[in-house]
Structure formats: structure tokens, C-alpha cells
Image (cartoon, rainbow, N blue to C red):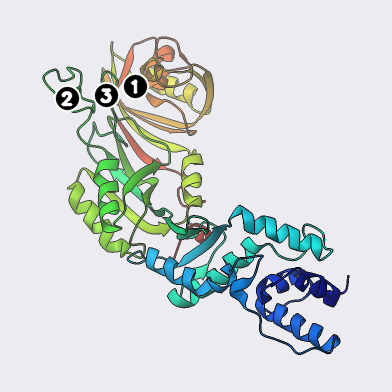
Amino acid sequence: MDVLEVAARATATGPVCDACLGRLVADRSFGLSNAERGSALRTALALRDDEDHEPVDTGACWVCEGRCTEFNEWAERAAEAAEGTEFATYNVGTRPPPLIEENEALLREEAGLDDDAGEPFKSEFNREVGKRFGRLTGAEVSFDRPDVQFTIDLAEDEIDAKVNSTFVYGRYRKLERDIPQTEWPCRECKGSGRKGPDPCDHCGGSGYLYDDSVEEYTAPVVEDVMDGTEATFHGAGREDVDALMLGTGRPFVIEVEEPRRRRVDVERLQSDINAFADGAVEVEGLRLATYDMVERVKEHDAAKRYRAQVAFDADVDADALAAAIEELEGTTVEQYTPNRVDHRRASITRERDVYEATAEVDDARRATVEIHGEGGLYIKELISGDEGRTEPSLAGLLGVGAEVTALDVVAVEGEDEPFEREEFFRD
């Protein structure tokens, strides 16, 4: 249908503002706002019908009920809602009153248009408020997880500003034993500590099995510096509580919810964390990251190199140990879920490869064993056999009981890929 005929039918329904008129044919031209488009249509219609072009009282528009005059007001309210929060990107969403959506559908019908013709009121409101907000703040619109997301509820006359999380990536070294990666709530009291006159005997009333964690040494510092409401630690796998994490460290991401600050000096932040951890944990390579980095870290299943101090139940000579290690090297190990983690892991049999293995006798009943293995390989059980749950094992090949007395992760391989790709970082 000719656009002037559309305009004629639309204006015949009653007072319609320029924006609502132009929105009907928004898909037929480009480079104009709907208000400009509607004004041009009204002028052309008046000229065609040889009538004077009278200004329209937009406040009397029966379709939007004057809402299309409120773009500036809502942009200013959005800026006030975000005051005190640091952000570079934003997006605007709108919940129109049901009556406006009904009016819009009726106008299309009266104008002889399909239901999906032109542009919806909601889309125009989002765009026009967003453009004005961008000019007020200097921020850029983003449709992919913006720093702040505004939702305008026209019926309730409210605006909600949701501040999305920000992320810090880095690698950590754990330099003391008996420190878990994350907080470890007590299984007996479910983290409550059973406060009052009857504290939990298992955790001493603290609610946690360990006083410290890598998370507790890092996340609160990041949360404080970024002025957030909560911080969550995401690690690329985890080492045993009693194992050291050495070498270049293990990749991690800290997610900070509702941060009021986003652009921080990561070198200073790194120094603050290391000072707070006081030698128990060290971090390096901190960078501001994107949301996608969390998934990358969680999915990372890198090969690792381990160094284990092993104690035997009987004397073991160097030749027997060398023969057993040679047999382990290059083999595929079947590991049923270990006894020590059976309460929190699915009971299944996993296959993992041992890439390299070496051993050095310390004395008749002690040795230092180094293993390069596939991600997910249980090293303690590879040594002990775990009552037959791991086959083959060093203990099984030697015919002698063996136990890991100290374990170090000396390298998490491949940590620079895919983590160092620029698409996962913020400037």
C-alpha cells in the first residue's frame, strides 16, 4: 500500500503523533527518526489533499498516550539511576503498558497493514532513550552483555538499572599446604557452625573445614577494590588441598557482582592480593576479562606435571622402581572414582593417559616420582592403586604398598591458550 494512503488511514483514526505515524512505515525508509518520518508524511499528505499542515498535539496521541514525548526524561532518569557506577557500555529495554500495545495493533489494522509492519513501539522507545542516554554519558550501546542494563517499566513509572558482573583473570600459585581452592563448608553442619551453646564438633563452630582458601586470599580483595556486592572464584580445575600449586600457576577468574568500579589498576590489584596473602598464595598476570572467560576457565582440562614424594611399605631397589615407572609411562590408566572423593563425585570409571614418568630413589623406602599426565588423572591413586580402583598403579606393579606423602603441581600446561586471546579481555 502507498505510504500516503497508510498515513491517511492512520490519521483518520484520531490524533496520532508524528512518531507513531512514522513508526508504521519505518521499514520502508532509512536515515530518519520516526518523528521526522511522520512529520514528512503529514506534510506530504496535506499537500496532496491541498490542506494546511497543522502541528499535531503529540500529548493527545491516542496510540502512545504521549509517551513518545518522554524520551529525554527517561534518558535523564537512567543517567540518575546509574550515578556513581562506572560503565562503558549499556542497553535499554522497555515494558510498555498493555494498552499501548493494543492501540498499536489497532492502528496497524486501521491503516491496512500487517501485524509485523513498521517498527514496534518498544523498539523505538529503547532506541530513542538509548541514543539520548549515550549522548548524556558518553557510553556506547551494546547488545552483548553490557556493563549496565536499564529496564523501563512505563506502566509502573519505574526504571531498574542492573549492573552486570565484571571479571578479573589471572594465575595463582599456592605455596602452602592444607589450603583448599575455594571455601569448604563443613559437611556435618552444612556451614552453619551450629551457633550458640552447641557448636559443631567437626568444624569447631566455624562452619568451615579450613580457615583459609585461595578464594579467601583473592576474591575479597578484588571485590573491595571494585566496590562490588559479592565475588566468586572460578578455577581451571583444582589441586588437592594438601598439594602445592607451583610453576606458572593455575588460571582463574574472579567474578565481581554489581561493581561500582570497573577500570582498576590491575598491577596494583595484584600487589594488594599478594600482600594480603602474605606468602601463602601468589597471583600474577591479572587482566580485566569478559564473561566468556569464565566458561573458558571452567572447561579447561589441561595436562599437568606433578612431583610426588612417595613412601613404600617395604624396601624398593632402584632397578625395580625404574622398571615399574617404565611400564607406567605411556599407558592408559583406568581409574574408578577414588575412595577419598567418592562422596562428592559420580561413581564411574575414567580412562586417563600417563604421558611421561620418572622416579629417583631417595632411600630404600622413599622416592621422588614425577608424572606428566592427562587432565583429570588422579596421581595419588596412580601411586597407591586405591585398593584396586586404579589399574595399573605403581604399588601394583611393584607389589609393595605405596603412598604419596607430599604432592606438588609443577605445571598446568597450555594455560596461555586459549586464555591469551584478546577477545576474552577488556581494555
Does residue 50 appear left or right of residue 229 in this picture? right
Residue at 76 percent of width and 80 percent of height: 41
- For the residues marked 2 and 3, what is the alpha-carbon distance in whole angstroms? 13 Å
- For the residues marked 3 and 1, what is the alpha-carbon distance in whole angstroms? 43 Å
* Amino acid type of the residue tagged 2 in the rendering: Lys
* Above or below: residue 333 compared with residue 9: above
The x and y percentages for residue 155 are 52, 56
* Amino acid type of the residue tagged 1 in the rendering: Ala
Residue carrying label 3: 186
Whether residue 31 is visible here, answered yes or no, is: no
Residue at 33 percent of width and 47 percent of height: 231
Residue carrying label 2: 195
- Quadrant including the C terminus: bottom left
Residue carrying label 1: 318
Quadrant of res 106: bottom right
Sequence-first disc among 1 and 2: 2
Sequence-first disc among 3 and 1: 3
Does residue 85 appear left or right of residue 179 in this picture? right
Does residue 36 appear left or right of residue 231 in this picture? right
Residue most extreme to the left: 197
